[in-house]
Image (tube, rainbow, N blue to C red):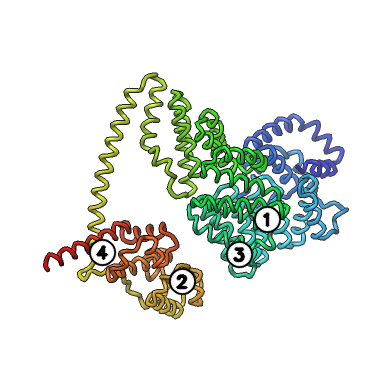
Amino acid sequence: MYSKILLQQYYSGFSGFQLWIFTKSAVAFLLINCYLSIDYLIFEVGLAESIQYVALAITGLFPDKEQSPNLIDAPMKQLFKLVLLVPFWLQSQNASFQIPDSIQHKDFRYLEDRIYQFRNDSTRAALYLFSYVKKAKRGKNWRELQNGYQSLLHQSPPALRLVYADSMVYAAKKTSDDAAIGAAFLTKGIVFYAQKKYKEALDDYLIANEYIARTNDYYLIYKVKYNMALLKSYSGFYEEAISLLRECVSYYKKKHDRAYLNSLHSLGLSYNKVGNYGLCSQTNAEGIRESEKRAVPEMTSYFKHSEGVNQYFLKNYQQSIDYLKNTVAVLENNDDFANEAVGNFYIGKSYWALKKHETAIPYFTKVDQILNSRQFTRRDLLESYQLLINYYKTKDNAKLHLYYIDQLFKADRLLHETNLYLVSKVNKEYDNKTHIIEKQKLEHLIDKGKYNDIIFIAIVTLLFMILLFLGYRDFKNKSMYQKKFEALMDKNGKAQKETTKIPHSGIADINPTVAAELIKQLEKWEKDKKFLDQDISLVKLAASFNSNTKYLSLIVYHYRHKKFVTYVNDLKIDYLIQALEENKQLRQYNQKALAEEIGFSSIQRFAHAFQARTEMPASYFMAQLRKEETTSGLQTKTAL
């Protein structure tokens, strides 16, 4: 990418004697080590990235380790400087990238315009990108250095983007500007998200929000909302994602074309996830029209891709295939491996639904190829492995049968490592225990050749053991829940409310007067039952107390012995238990209504909080209350 600039810089820095020494004494050493070094680097990061690493090492624009913790490992960097570049070492200072005289005195806006002009020609843009960064570094202009690294990030291959993201954050911190720092962390989070590193992306989004929330930059505020919505959708909180995305669509619609279309596209995907296929199709149609109207044609493929997936769920399988086949090639060209995998999966599923199993198989294997090359999968894509496993099982192809069982385990581990919720119903339909037993049998029987009777006996035995285990576990759980229910209710039939004695002394890091005031405010907040608000958060509560999140979090943890989220959830659950005991009409509410009554945004969060607080499911608790009410009513009638 930058080879022309590098050659000009290097050859101009050598004297004739130095070149003679280099060519006569080091040529063999250089050829051998260049081959080994480049071969190693290409193996590690790919050809395009290798060229940029060499360019960065030579020009002296490799960011410092302090700036870039995600920089390629030190041994690899040293490999280049000491092995590949040994002949150039004595000239390293003079050979560092120098801004050409023709643009030496040009300002940042001129360089920025040229970078934009050559945005589709990275070779020509390289001169201006490096000049921009060099000029900003030399003048310690942190704001412009942040902009320079951001421009380099967008022009770079994926393997280098985190390097520049780290440097961008480093420069942004030097500005001491909340918006700049927040924007840098947000961009870094987006880089992580693009690489499907969701935990790291979330960490950076939360940091970005801390800074951006202190500004009036609504574009950045909604950009945080958009990216949080993507994570919520990926984690299965589709209703919450839809709510955030609707806000983003409304805000971006007037002035920000690409952000508006991105939000609209994600909204359509979320509608599909909640089963609102009609609204998904309507959103996709609007997206296609708006993409043409706003002259952003590249987004058309994404809306058609979304509609192809949606048509599968509408059982219009041929339409699904037509839509997706027209977009998969574009996505592959854009290196959008995630949507490429999804497209291939639903093409395969559509062919499978049309009973064209042989045609479907290559599309499922493409999903597996992307898992191997990009370490990407998601819950719905796991079904491709179930279909491949069953297909090769019926074909008596033991090797591929075993291979796809192994791949299913690999994909399952990957999902758990990225902190996803439960793996989708694929695991329920094809139980892991069955796979473990079958895998062991297959490995043995590939060598032995005959295994039908053994597998049959193993499966029957396993099914019997599973049924026995499930029956025992159900009985044990019900017994445990009954004990928990009885322990929860006191003599008067009221739920026990947790109390904590509050010490008079303050926390070491907090002024005792401040701590006492916070405790007083917290007690009043509890007494007024403001914990029932749905949108309560540590940030909002701290603001209402005229305090900060750190102090309030310490107070809650020190005096209530809980983290803030657990503390609020427990207050809600304790309130509900007492209300259900006192108000029998509440017992007729379903779980969704109860969740809304005490300020939970979803049934899932309510159920999780109830289980954590009481060690029993909410459904069991409600059933027991109704059972006691029925029993009490029958006893009253009998007495009469």
Disc number lying in front (1 or 2)? 1
Say which residue label 3 marks. 221
In the picture shown, does residue 573 fall above or below 524? above
Task: Name which residue type carries label 2.
Answer: Leu
Q: Are marks 1 and 4 in contact (CB under 8 Å)?
A: no
Work out whether residue 31 or residue 214 is closer to the camera in this orientation and state it: 214
Question: Spatial distance from mark 4 to mark 3, Cα to Cα?
Answer: 44 Å
- Estimate the x, y position of residue 96 in percent, counting from the top left: 77, 48
Work out whether residue 42 or residue 444 is closer to the camera in this orientation and state it: 444
Say which residue label 1 marks. 258
Q: Which mark is drawn over residue 552? A: 2
Q: Residues within 10 Å of mark 2 (few under 14, many from 20)?
A: many
In the picture shown, does residue 362 fall above or below 98? above
Q: Is residue 147 left or right of residue 439?
A: right
Instruction: Answer with mark 1 or mark 4, whichever residue precedes in sequence.
Output: 1
- Secondary element at image label 3: helix
Task: Name which residue type carries label 1.
Answer: Arg
In the picture shown, does residue 474 fall above or below 361? below
Question: Spatial distance from mark 3 to mark 1, Cα to Cα?
Answer: 16 Å
Q: Which mark is drawn over residue 488? A: 4
Question: Spatial distance from mark 1 to mark 2, Cα to Cα?
Answer: 39 Å
Q: Are marks 2 and 3 in contact (CB under 8 Å)?
A: no
Q: Is residue 633 left or right of residue 354?
A: left
